[in-house]
Image (spheres, helix red, strand yellow):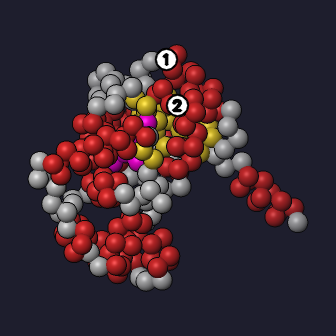
């Protein structure tokens, strides 16, 4: 009885470990206070530039890095790219003032699991962190709007070559699940197939759609409206 109670207590206090990376001390202090007030979150470290963010991510191996873009020494985009290479289990949520579409696409290509504006942090940040911790992708309404606008512009210019119709029903199903952040193992369990089969389908999807990374796949899925349900 005692052993069970201890195990349950340990599980109950498990928290999402977060590293804050922003060059504004006052902003970090405010974020730290807000996040530490959550029963399931804990700020385990801080960084004032991209290079320090990488060093602290390697040292602390947090669950999530809350990353600004414009920082001295190394940008948040490059820091994200390096963190995903060296600590792939750590997720990155970009928190920035920039609405620029190129920043959004660069962040996703670098491996970020989410993108949101600082002005929305007081209302949306907690839910965004939970979404990302659950293995899914979070994009703010502004980021979603930018991606849709980019798609429409490409369609008008005749640049968007959509091969979605060439996908089988199973491939479409797997495309949506991958874009939602599910791993091959989780997809295999959900569809009752082997992880190797999922990997084969995923390769075929990438080839047919001419995509080269998960970030590009998420961008494509957003354009197709596959993540709206």
As helix, strand or loop, the secondary structure at mark 1 comes to helix
Left or right of 131: which side holds 206? left
Residue 50: % across, % down: 35, 30
| Residue shown at 36% from the left, 79% from the top | 170
| Cα distance between the residues tagged 2 and 1 | 16 Å
Outermost residue, right direction? 1
Q: Is residue 214 visible?
A: no
Which is more toward the observer, 165 or 134? 165
**In the image, residue 214 above or below residue 62:** below
| Residue shown at 83% from the left, 59% from the top | 5
Outermost residue, left direction? 158
Which is more toward the observer, 84 or 220? 220
Quadrant of the image containing the N terminus: bottom right
Q: Which residue is mark 2?
A: 121
**In the image, residue 108 above or below residue 53:** below
Residue 149: % across, % down: 27, 43
| Residue shown at 52% from the left, 23% from the top | 28
In the image, the segment drawn in magenta is: 111-116
Outermost residue, bottom direction? 193
Q: Pointers 2 and 1 in contact (CB under 8 A)?
A: no
Instruction: Work out whether mark 2 precedes mark 1 in sequence or the reverse, and give the earlier one.
Output: 1
Residue 37: % across, % down: 68, 32
**In the image, residue 33 above or below residue 153:** above
Residue 31: % across, % down: 56, 27
Q: Which residue is mark 1?
A: 25
């Amino acid at each position: 009885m005692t052993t069970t109670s201890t195990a349950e207590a340990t599980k109950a206090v498990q928290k999402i470990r977060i590293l804050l990376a922003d060059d504004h001390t006052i902003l970090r202090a405010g974020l730290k206070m807000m996040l530490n007030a959550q029963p399931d979150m804990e700020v385990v470290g801080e960084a004032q530039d991209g290079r320090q963010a990488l060093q602290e991510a390697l040292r602390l191996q947090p669950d999530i890095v809350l990353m600004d873009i414009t920082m001295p020494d190394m940008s948040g985009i490059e820091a994200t790219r390096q963190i995903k290479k060296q600590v792939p289990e750590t997720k990155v949520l970009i928190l920035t003032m920039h609405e620029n579409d190129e920043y959004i696409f660069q962040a996703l290509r670098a491996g970020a699991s989410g993108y949101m504006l600082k002005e929305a942090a007081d209302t949306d940040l907690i839910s965004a962190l939970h979404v990302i911790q659950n293995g899914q992708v979070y994009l703010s309404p502004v980021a979603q709007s930018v991606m849709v606008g980019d798609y429409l512009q490409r369609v008008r210019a005749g640049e968007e070559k959509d091969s979605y119709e060439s996908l089988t029903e199973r491939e479409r199903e797997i495309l949506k699940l991958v874009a939602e952040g599910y791993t091959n193992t989780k997809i295999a369990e959900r569809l009752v197939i082997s992880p190797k089969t999922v990997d084969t389908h995923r390769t075929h999807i990438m080839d047919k759609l001419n995509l080269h990374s998960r970030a590009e796949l998420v961008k494509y899925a957003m354009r197709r409206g596959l993540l709206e349900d």
